Amino acid sequence: MMSVKILEFGSNWWARFGRDHDDPNRYTRYAAYYNSAGIRCANKVRRYWVLPGLVRFNGVGDFSPHFPRRSIGETFWCANPVFTCGGNRVLFVRRAATSTVPDHYLVTVSSDRHGSLDLGNPNWKSQSTWPISISQLRDRQEALLLMGPETWVRTALGIWRLVVRPSFPNGASLQLAEKSPNTDELVMRYAKGSLVINPERDIPLLRQVRNSKFVSHHQFV
Amino acid sequence: MYGAGSAVYRITKDGITLLEHHGQFTAVLHSNTEHLPHLSQVFHSLELNAVQLALSRANLLAGWQSEIEIASFNTISRSPYQKDYDAIVDVWIGDRKVRFALEYERILKSFKQYERIRSALEAERQIECVLYLASEWKY
């Protein structure tokens, strides 16, 4: 067993229910809920898996399918990852005590927010970053990953390192590193003097500053 | 800003213009507003942020409307709230979402001001619960 803290889910959710239509536990005890990477196409999320895989929650676990986002920031005891039925699988068994130190973090990296992944490059991730599932449609990508502290993934924007810090909202966060973890080579993110606004990250932050009137640096971090 | 413990940020006119470009408008603070939030509000805002962050970190926060959003709503709505509350907060209690208005009191007001607040709260019909928090004096 390993302990995994959920920082983010993939975009793709689905459920399977018990096969016996007369069983009153069909939608509870015998239900299972799955999450994986996915690509949003209009009002639907498609798999477009280039690496098939999923995480599974059982109906009897500590996971609420009605409020999946409430599991974010929670640590679960999980079965070790296996490759079966044509894909990677990780079973989230039960919620761990809040004092449990996670072995791994469930993280989602998307081309929209983190920059595109060069999956053909063998060095696109650190050795101990474990991809569960990856979706790709043309230039859009999403990857559901298990990452340990200080592991990293490389995107077109640079190196994203998983930094564990108690002051972060869920205790850990992907941070864009200025330097490559293997060399001292500087990674250039944008041309000097340019200003690039990310609608998904910068605008909510700016809105928070406006709505709060004043925000301290500590409250941002 | 002395005493805040770190740098303190406030939105600029350019920031508001950028937000408006992305469809984020408020009626009371927009790119033509003459005055940005006054520096005298810094500590009130920071301490209110601390309340919001504490609820969020405890995984209880389901929604937070700021005073600016509430005041904007009150400006344009036909059925406004009785007061520009500091926040309207939705929190999780089990699987139930509960709403309350939050007032954060840093400075003691005059008797007459409290009378006016009391009248407003008594006339409030849209919010069932108002939580009044008072600042803890550590100085």
Image: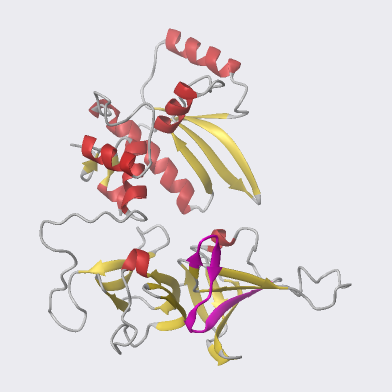
Whether B1 is drawn above or below A125: the answer is above
Q: Nearer the viewer, residue A39 or B62?
A: A39
Q: Nearer the viewer, residue B41 or A28?
A: A28
**Residue A127 quadrant:** bottom left
- Point out residue A118 in the picture as x, y percentages from the top left corner: 31, 81
Residue shown at the point (48%, 47%) measured from the top left: B55
Task: Give the magenta part as a residue range.
Answer: A40-58
- Point out residue B114 in the picture as x, y percentages from the top left corner: 47, 14
Q: Nearer the viewer, residue A122 or A49?
A: A49
Whether A8 is drawn above or below A131: the answer is above
Residue A41 visible in the picture: yes
Residue shown at the point (25%, 41%) measured from the top left: B15
- In the displayed structure image, the side of residue A70 where residue A24 appears, left or right: right
- In the displayed structure image, the side of residue B61 where residue A24 appears, left or right: right
Whether B55 is drawn above or below A150: the answer is above
Residue shown at the point (24%, 41%) measured from the top left: B9
